[in-house]
Amino acid sequence: MRITEIREIAVPLHGDISNAVVNFSAHRVSLVAVVSDVIRDGAPIVGIGFNSIGRHAQSGILADRMIPRVLSADEQDLLDGHTGLLDPAAVARCALRDEKPGGHGDRAGAAAAIELACWDLLAKYADEPAHATIARAFGAAPATGGVPVYAAGGYYRGENELSALGDEIRGYLGDGYRAVKIKIGGQPLADDLRRIDAAIEVTGAADRVAVDANARFDQTGALAYARALAPYGLRWYEEPVDPLDYQATATVIAEYPGPVATGENLFSRQDAVNLLRYSGIRSDRDILQMDAGLSYGLTEYQSMITEMEAAGFHRTSAMPHGGHLINLHIVVGLGLGGCEAYPGVFAPFGGYSPGCVVRDGIITPADDPGFGLEAKPGLAELITELAKG
Ligand code: MG
């Protein structure tokens, strides 16, 4: 197997929504196609990947650095010596040639888009869903019976905030979700508590409502929220402080008895190791949300899972950020704790294809080959365009 071409387009996210820190209206995502020399049904097998949601496209890094490195590599250096097929880890290593360690920023997403496209390519070559390829590659027990999923939303919308939030959550419950996540930190604490009360009223239980501060607070602000949130018994309190401030995270965790979730903005194994070492994060309740699409791809992500397990965590403590098909297949393939969904948000990347079934808070992936991105309306048309070149 040989890579003949790698293409990228920067795709705008639909919608104009905000969390406590970021407005997503100008966000774009790098959609990447890795074209192989394997011809099936008259066309080359093409692997498709992207760099998750919530960060910007990395067109420059891909075009100037990574794609030329991979395309100019010795073919043998990109292959698995046993199978003769592409080795996603080797491709990622090549994409990162001559890059210094540390500083895990946008390049981690750029490399991930290529590496994940290689996994899609391998799964399509085997004519199977990507979770099967992933489970086999890492010796994991796949959760083919489905995995827990929750609806992430509850963004600030301005007018009629509480009634709109209630309607939104009722819609999720009607679609088969049992748990939701809403944003906090974008308005005063008292107003956020009213939003939380409204969400609990609709779901019927506090442990079906998680809240996400998107690293909005300093330590003092995070502690004020921790004290106000503690009596509720919420599902979890997400990203209270800067993701790299492990001491502040530890201070909040020491004050907050319920589950804390964090990690979506850590882009490397080393950052995850530091979180495990220094943040006070607890293996019996807390949630780790690192995201392969933001952190060099599945190979690096699997190394984070290995570190988590070495630190005494069960892999079901991992619930990756980014509610989309790629992470669904990773969660199922590696037997992780669950994934999020963005029904109706972050199109065309967020959410799942029509063949995926959500019932009683459990999602089961469709049987499409690879990540099944071609089966998702909105994304399918872009992939057709990208694959044609
Ligand atoms: Mg979050």
Image (cartoon, rainbow, N blue to C red):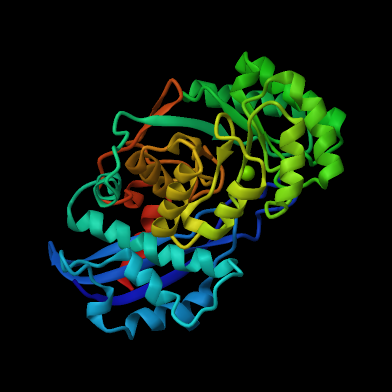
To which quarter of the image does residue 49 belong? bottom left
The quadrant where ligand 1 appears is top right
Name above or below for residue 195 compared with residue 8: above
Label tally: 0
Residue 74 image offset from top left, x and y in percent: 27, 84
Q: Give the residue displayed 73% in from the left and 25% down from the top.
A: 196
To which quarter of the image does residue 170 belong? top right
Residue 256 image offset from top left, x and y in percent: 73, 30
176 lies left or right of 187? left
215 lies left or right of 225? left
Closer to the camera, 60 or 255?
255
Quadrant location of the N terminus in the rendered image: bottom left
Residue 37 image offset from top left, x and y in percent: 19, 73
Q: Give the residue displayed 82% in from the left and 47% down from the top.
A: 218
Name above or below for residue 275 compared with residue 102: above
Whether residue 382 appears in this view of the structure is no
Residue 228 image offset from top left, x and y in percent: 82, 26
Whether residue 12 appears in this view of the structure is yes
77 lies left or right of 61? left
Quadrant location of the C terminus in the rendered image: bottom left
Q: Give the residue displayed 24% in from the left and 54% down from the top.
A: 123
Q: Give the residue displayed 55% in from the left and 66% down from the top.
A: 57
Closer to the camera, 292 or 172?
292
287 lies left or right of 298? right
Residue that lies at the very extreme toward the left in this rendered image:
41
